[in-house]
Image: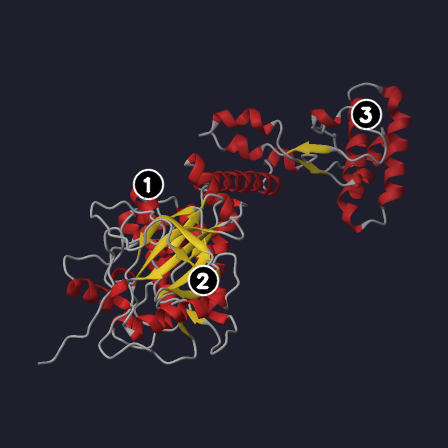
Amino acid sequence: MNQDKTRIIVPAQGVDPYQTRHSSVPVEFEEKKGACFGDCVIEHPLGMGGAAAVYLAKHQKLEVLRAIKVLKGQFRNDSQFKKRFLKEAKLVAGLDHPAIVRIHTVGEADGKPFIEMEWIDGTSLRRLFEERGAMPPAVAVAIAEQVAHALAYAHTAPIADGAGVVHRDIKPENILVQKDGRIKLVDFGIARTMESSNDTVAGTIIGTLHYMSPEQIDGRNADARSDLYSLSVVLYEMLTGFAPFTAATFTAIIKKISEGRYVSLKRVNPRTARIVSDIVRKGLRSQAEERFQTATELSEAFRALRVRTRLDPDQIVREWLFSGKAPDLVNTRKRIRYFVYACLFAGAAGLYFYADHNPRAEEKAVYTQPVMADSAVPIVPVRDTLSRAVPQGQETIIPSQSLVRKVRVFPKLKPIAKNMPRQVQSPAETRFEQAAALDQRYRRGEVELRDAVRGAWQTYIKEYSKDPASEKFVSDAKKRLLYIINN
């Protein structure tokens, strides 16, 4: 009779390394208060995992708190479990990162293998789910960024027998959140080196079902991309409050994971920023080649989102833990405000250029018809703003108000026209209009201005006769001068 060797580690009630998850099922701990493990004395239990229990202990010589991980009694005679248990200490002892739990020593007391670790004053991500539900996007990204940064280090750390460590069991229970907003990655019990062969037996599935990658389920060699897949599952759960692959039976869950069928973030919450949903969608690809290829790449994607808040990841998490507030990951209101400003600016620029290049016909011409020497010269209309004396050489400004006058459907815009940008005249045109204004006064009866008018036209002709751009004005000035001389 063939025996089914398939073993799946699943979330169980009361299984939490640091007693951060409440349970209605009583858990029996083997070690009692006062038991000695090396230089540490047990204070009380913290939590229980699948193969080991964790206790809070006090180091007698250093007088500091430690976490003692003790292998369960039923596994102490199992060489495979004992090997994996001691391997965890060896792997983690070679890692030195602020987001990875530190191993101080390993030993055996009365035939009980134990690992002495640093004690983390915090709570697990699982407990935060149960207490607060889904997290704000900024908080979820800040936590995931810290985990990705720790994995980037672990995957490339030069250890004794390989080029890095694959965790293979990334889940909320193994991510501890400290009071200062920083995280600690714990429980490398089923980790393996990047260069070692897969040490699981045939038909054995190692990991926690809801967070396992398709290659783990198929029993294939799981590399660093498998950890990134599990982290994407955790990120999805942080954003929604539930895991992406859920079903009534293990078989149905495995089928969903293999096929990559889950409810997209946009359907769960239409207000989710597209860039966040794109990161999750890429991280949950069934084919490893289509996911993020390195933890550094995923960490940079999170960082690009987080820097918009102008806060460090631990600051975001700490603020949320104590006040419940979190910054906007994508500031929709600010983006809308900037969009409105851009539209207003573009509209104002359009009004300016359209008005400057489309003046009214009566504003475009300085005079109505040429003045002939042998004909009666009509009084030429000149702008009121130019009838005042203007110092020689100073440019005259003409308001561009034609567009607002044309747009009759917006009568409220007419007052704005007075403050619209103005068009600059050339010096030749300005001097011509000054002389033309004086010429009008002479023709209206102020005969005493005859010499002044004649001198003005003579000076104008002398100064601008060689300027091709002023040919039209010089020609008219000559006709007006001839009229003054003959009359």
**Neighbour tally class for label 1: few under 14, some 14-19, many 20 plus, Cα within 10 Å:** few
Residue kind at label 1, given as amino acid type: Arg
Which residue is found at the position 57% from the left and 34% from the top?
402
Query: Closer to the camera: disc 1 or disc 2?
Result: 1
Precedes in sequence: disc 3 or disc 1: 1
Image quadrant of residue 110?
bottom left
Residue on which the image places disc 2? 298
Q: Secondary structure at mark 1?
A: helix
Q: Secondary structure at mark 3?
A: loop
Mark 3 → mark 1, Cα distance in angstroms:
77 Å
176 relative position to 22: left or right: right
Query: Closer to the camera: disc 3 or disc 1?
Result: 1
Asked if the residue at tag 3 contacts the one at tag 2, i.e. Cβ–Cβ closer than 8 Å, the answer is no
**Neighbour tally class for label 3: few under 14, some 14-19, many 20 plus, Cα within 10 Å:** few
Q: Is residue 454 above or below residue 171?
A: above
Precedes in sequence: disc 1 or disc 2: 1
Residue on which the image places disc 1? 132
Residue 307 seen from this side: yes
The percent position of residue 175, horizontal first and vertical second, equals 39, 54
The percent position of residue 28, horizontal first and vertical second, equals 24, 52
184 relative position to 233: left or right: right
Residue 297 seen from this side: no
Q: Nearer the viewer, residue 235 or 118?
A: 118
Mark 1 → mark 2, Cα distance in angstroms:
26 Å
Residue kind at label 3, given as amino acid type: Ala
The percent position of residue 281, horizontal first and vertical second, equals 34, 60
Quadrant for the C terminus, please. top right
**Neighbour tally class for label 2: few under 14, some 14-19, many 20 plus, Cα within 10 Å:** many
Q: Is residue 453 above or below residue 305?
A: above
Q: Nearer the viewer, residue 270 or 220?
A: 220
The percent position of residue 69, horizontal first and vertical second, equals 38, 59
The circle on residue 252 is none
